[in-house]
Image (spheres, grey):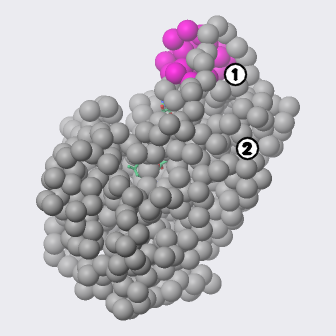
């Protein structure tokens, strides 16, 4: 069966959100309410902020306002790789914050452990599996990068297992694999939508008032409190936390640092046991390949394969549009790559195809800040690796709102901002040129051209 035929019946919806277990949305806000803390955004950033605000101080009056449904955006439609890394990978963190990378790695590991403990403590069922991630090389030039990763981790006391061709194929049998690194501790697999829905329920149990289908349209400082305007009501809050991801921000200054980038994924039907046996994959690791334009893939509970990544698409003008969630050229490319990686699965069909928007910034890892005399705080810019890091970001938001000096708020990573993107139309030109150069680097054994080397020298780039 051709890749096109395998895609023919795939629903144009995120698999995770398209299930009968999806909860009913909570009613929207009507009328005026007051709160100590208003959280805007019901993705992982907002959910963790609201949840941990109540854990820090159960008497705090917290509301959460979500424009559509909790988890409908990136948080409920992603690959479900819940990584310890707070810096979009060790290499990126080491390049940018060499003096504090050991601390960042430790804080990241603690954050991931704490996510697991919290899910267990509240009984959130979301198939959280500490199976790790296998990063594979599919071209000779990528093998050196794997070796570098192992020694970089070792220099910080971490242990990654380097697998040769036979060893990696004994784990997961693809003829495309030339070698791999298994990071057993640093990544968990999770069902992202069930995690978002579960965190919503925990928030409600802890006393957070959650309003869905309640977009915040305005933000106004009346001197005493911050006032958030919604279509049928308003919130007067002492403190405001913004966790609005890649969407047009309520704080204008964030527009300089964020670009909305679309990432795409497919889901297969469950792989029959006999075919699964041919591939192996008994240890159920998440897998990522090592090109600049990389694929990520993992198993679900019922042994479907989620297959995503490769294209990272910026639409000129930086708009966020529902129609961008679908991109047939990318789906066809992804399906073709899937069968090249797993020819044994010839004949398998895809049941879902979707995309989603990520909040890319030029340093690929979240940035933080305050406004209105530190009565508002935000975290954004996770650039495609926020499933785990958003909990760290939520803790930073709460530290900043409480005016607390902590190990987190003292980090340069937290205090510094990324390099801003230039304004449009230069922004589109720069991003499209960079995407082209990245694709060329993959075709030329990873060699970076003068443009990418210049960006590297300034510590900026484009990623997903
Ligand atoms: C296809 C895809 C695959 C990905 N795979 C992975 C992965 O495997 N691992 C990983 O770590 N990361 C992955 N990511 C990224 C990850 O999903 C995000 O980093 C993370 O979910 C960001 O969470 P967030 O809460 O900051 O943003 P979001 O989940 O985007 O949530 C923001 C919320 O704010 C709401 N909102 C915005 N403006 C307003 C307003 N004015 N009023 C009210 N509500 C508002 C939105 O409706 C939305 O629900 C992926 C992303 C995509 C799209």
Q: Quadrant of residue 52?
A: top right
- Dot 1 or dot 2: first in sequence order is 2
Q: Residue at x 73, y 55 (%)?
A: 120
Task: Name the residue carrying label 1.
Answer: 237
Residue 33 placement, left or right of 243: right
| Residue 218 is covered by the magenta coloring | yes
From which residue to which does the magenta span run? 211-236
Q: Position of residue 185 (x, y in %)?
A: 59, 74
The disc at residue 52 is 2
Contact? badges 1 and 2 (CB < 8 Å): no
Above-or-below relation of 306 to 214: below
Q: Indicate which disc residue 122 carries.
A: none
Q: Relative to the observer, which residue lies in front, 391 or 331? A: 331
Q: Residue visible at 26% across and 74% down?
A: 344
Corner quadrant of residue 254: top left
Q: Nearer the viewer, residue 457 or 243?
A: 243
Residue closest to the eye, 447 or 459 = 447
x 33%, y 56%: residue: 268
């Amino acid at each position: 069966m051709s890749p096109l035929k395998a895609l023919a019946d795939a629903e144009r919806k995120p698999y995770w959100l398209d299930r009968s277990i999806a909860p009913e949305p909570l009613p929207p806000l009507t009328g005026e309410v007051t709160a100590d803390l208003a959280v805007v955004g019901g993705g992982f950033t907002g959910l963790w902020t609201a949840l941990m605000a109540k854990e820090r101080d159960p008497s705090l009056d917290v509301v959460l306002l979500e424009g559509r449904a909790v988890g409908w955006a990136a948080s409920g439609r992603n690959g479900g790789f819940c990584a310890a890394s707070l810096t979009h990978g060790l290499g990126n963190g080491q390049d940018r914050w060499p003096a504090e990378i050991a601390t960042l790695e430790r804080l990241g590991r603690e954050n991931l452990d704490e996510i697991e403990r919290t899910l267990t403590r509240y009984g959130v069922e979301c198939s959280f599996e500490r199976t790790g991630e296998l990063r594979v090389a599919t071209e000779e030039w990528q093998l050196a990068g794997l070796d570098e990763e192992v020694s970089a981790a070792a220099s910080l006391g971490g242990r990654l297992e380097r697998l040769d061709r036979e060893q990696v194929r004994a784990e997961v049998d693809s003829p495309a694999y030339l070698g791999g690194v298994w990071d057993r501790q640093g990544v968990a697999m999770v069902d992202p939508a069930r995690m978002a829905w579960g965190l919503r329920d925990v928030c409600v149990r802890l006393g957070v008032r959650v309003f869905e289908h309640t977009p915040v349209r305005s933000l106004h400082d009346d001197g005493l409190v911050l006032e958030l305007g919604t279509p049928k009501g308003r919130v007067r809050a002492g403190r405001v936390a913004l966790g609005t991801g890649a969407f047009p921000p309520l704080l204008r200054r964030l527009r300089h640092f964020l670009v909305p980038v679309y990432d795409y994924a497919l889901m297969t039907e469950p792989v029959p046991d006999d075919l699964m046996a041919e591939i192996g994959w008994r240890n159920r690791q998440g897998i990522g390949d090592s090109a600049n334009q990389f694929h990520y893939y993992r198993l679900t509970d019922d042994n479907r394969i989620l297959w995503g990544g490769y294209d990272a698409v910026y639409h000129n003008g930086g708009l966020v549009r529902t129609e961008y969630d679908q991109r047939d050229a990318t789906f066809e490319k992804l399906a073709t790559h899937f069968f090249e990686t797993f020819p044994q699965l010839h004949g398998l069909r895809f049941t879902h195809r979707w995309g989603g928007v990520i909040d890319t910034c030029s340093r690929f890892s979240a940035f933080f800040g305050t406004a209105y005399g530190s009565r508002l705080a935000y975290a954004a810019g996770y650039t495609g690796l926020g499933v785990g890091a958003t909990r760290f970001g939520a803790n930073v938001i709460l530290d900043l709102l409480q005016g607390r000096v902590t190990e987190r708020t003292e980090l340069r990573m937290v205090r510094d901002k990324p390099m801003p993107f230039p304004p449009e139309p230069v922004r589109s030109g720069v991003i499209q040129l960079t995407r082209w150069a990245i694709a060329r680097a993959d075709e030329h054994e990873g060699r970076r051209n003068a443009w990418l080397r210049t960006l590297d020298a300034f510590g900026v780039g484009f990623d997903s």
